[in-house]
Image: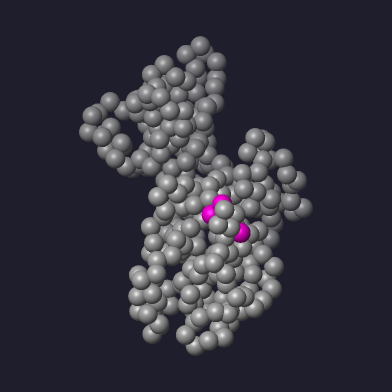
């Protein structure tokens, strides 16, 4: 085992394969990078002298220095299950935390390297979190939540069955209107939004849909005869929001415009190629709907000092 300053030392439990503790190597006692190491643990911020055992793995940063070639040769000769260059183990399946971290990273448009750099961790370790069942420390989750613009509770899946907005209002909240460009930016790419329609029975309805934004149009798939399908040929409202329960802040964007059913074959093929999401509801949902916003408005609530 060899390491450089700044590498990540991960201690995992062989019985479960889940990472139990990790820390940054801040001190070397041998010039060749062999143990022992001074490690600053992410869960306590304490530095201790560590003699790694068989349950320890080193995740290497890209150092770009003279030792990089030696490090690459060593990893090629002695591949580690946690090495950034090693492929995931056969049958590896990310846990819920890893799925949420990966989803939020992609939602923010960050590469693995960008997110890891902002969270002050090895890209290989972030890849490990996203690809395998893991148990990261609270300190790691706090850094990831800050990087991804979410909360530790959301990464852990806490409160999934609770309606949003049950937290306390901030002491000095500030509510401001969003301009069209900021609304487009927040609405862009893809996610889950809510469409407000007048159903075929004449009663109003609001239903969630998995949507994408392609060529400035909000698009989603549904099934003929469904509630969203009733939007065809009418003016509808479409709403997207994000809430940070821990900080009592968030935003919402409302798009209003005509909805139509996509019937052109070439357009449907293009949508199928470029969309990122599939309807969570499953089933045969091959009817494409498009909303062309004629109005975009939004609001954001933050503490008054932000």
Residue 154 belongs to magenta span: no
State whether residue 107 appears in this view. Answer: no
Q: Is residue 124 above or below residue 287?
A: below
Is 286 placed above or below 17 here?
above
| Number of marks drawn | 0
Residue ID at (37%, 24%):
284
At 55% from the left edge and 15% from the top edge, which residue is drawn? 203
Residue 8 coordinates in the image, percent (x, y): 53, 70
Viewed as shown, does residue 14 lie left or right of 65? right
The figure's colour scheme reads one colour
The reply, left or right, for residue 121 in relation to residue 137 is left
Give the quarter of the image for residue 293. top left
Q: Residue furthest bottom?
A: 31
Which quadrant is home to the C terminus?
Answer: bottom right
Measured as percent of width and height from the top left, residue 261 is found at 34, 25
- Residue at 27 percent across and 38 percent down: it is 270
Residue 195, how many percent across, how many down?
50, 29
Q: Residue at x 60, y 54 (%)?
A: 135
Q: Which residues fall within the magenta stretch?
A: 16-20
Taking depth in this image into account, of 10 and 152 the one nearest to the observer is 10
Question: What predominant SS class does the magenta segment belong to?
Answer: strand
Of 149 and 113, nearer the camera is 113
Q: Is residue 17 magenta?
A: yes
Residue lying farthest top? 201
Residue 46 visible at all = yes
Residue 262 picture location, percent across and down? 31, 28
């Amino acid at each position: 085992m060899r390491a450089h300053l700044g590498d990540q030392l991960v201690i995992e439990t062989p019985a479960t394969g889940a990472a139990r503790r990790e820390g940054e190597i801040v001190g070397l006692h041998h010039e060749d990078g062999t143990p022992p190491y001074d490690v600053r643990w992410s869960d306590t911020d304490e530095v201790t002298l560590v003699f790694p055992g068989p349950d320890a793995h080193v995740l290497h940063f890209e150092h770009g220095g003279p030792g990089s070639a030696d490090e690459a040769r060593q990893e090629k000769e002695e591949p580690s299950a946690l090495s950034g260059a090693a492929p995931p183990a056969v049958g590896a399946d990310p846990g819920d935390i890893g799925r949420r971290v990966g989803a939020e990273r992609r939602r923010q448009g960050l590469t693995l390297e960008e997110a890891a750099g902002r969270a002050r961790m090895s890209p290989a370790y972030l890849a490990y979190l996203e690809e395998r069942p893991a148990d990261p420390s609270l300190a790691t989750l706090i850094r990831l939540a800050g990087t991804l613009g979410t909360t530790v509770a959301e990464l852990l899946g806490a409160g999934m069955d609770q309606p949003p907005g049950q937290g306390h209002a901030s002491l000095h909240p500030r509510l401001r209107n969003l301009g069209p460009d900021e609304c487009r930016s927040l609405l862009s790419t893809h996610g889950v939004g809510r469409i407000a329609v007048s159903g075929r029975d004449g009663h109003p309805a609001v239903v969630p849909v998995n949507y994408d934004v392609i060529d400035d149009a909000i698009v989603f798939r549904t099934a003929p005869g469904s509630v969203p399908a009733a939007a065809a040929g009418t003016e509808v409202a479409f709403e997207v929001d994000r809430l940070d329960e821990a900080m009592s802040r968030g935003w919402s964007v409302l798009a209003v415009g005509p909805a139509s059913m996509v019937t052109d074959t070439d357009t449907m093929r293009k949508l199928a190629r470029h969309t990122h999401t599939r309807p969570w509801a499953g089933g045969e949902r091959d009817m494409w709907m498009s909303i062309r916003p004629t109005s975009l408005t939004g609001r954001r609530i933050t503490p008054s000092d932000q």
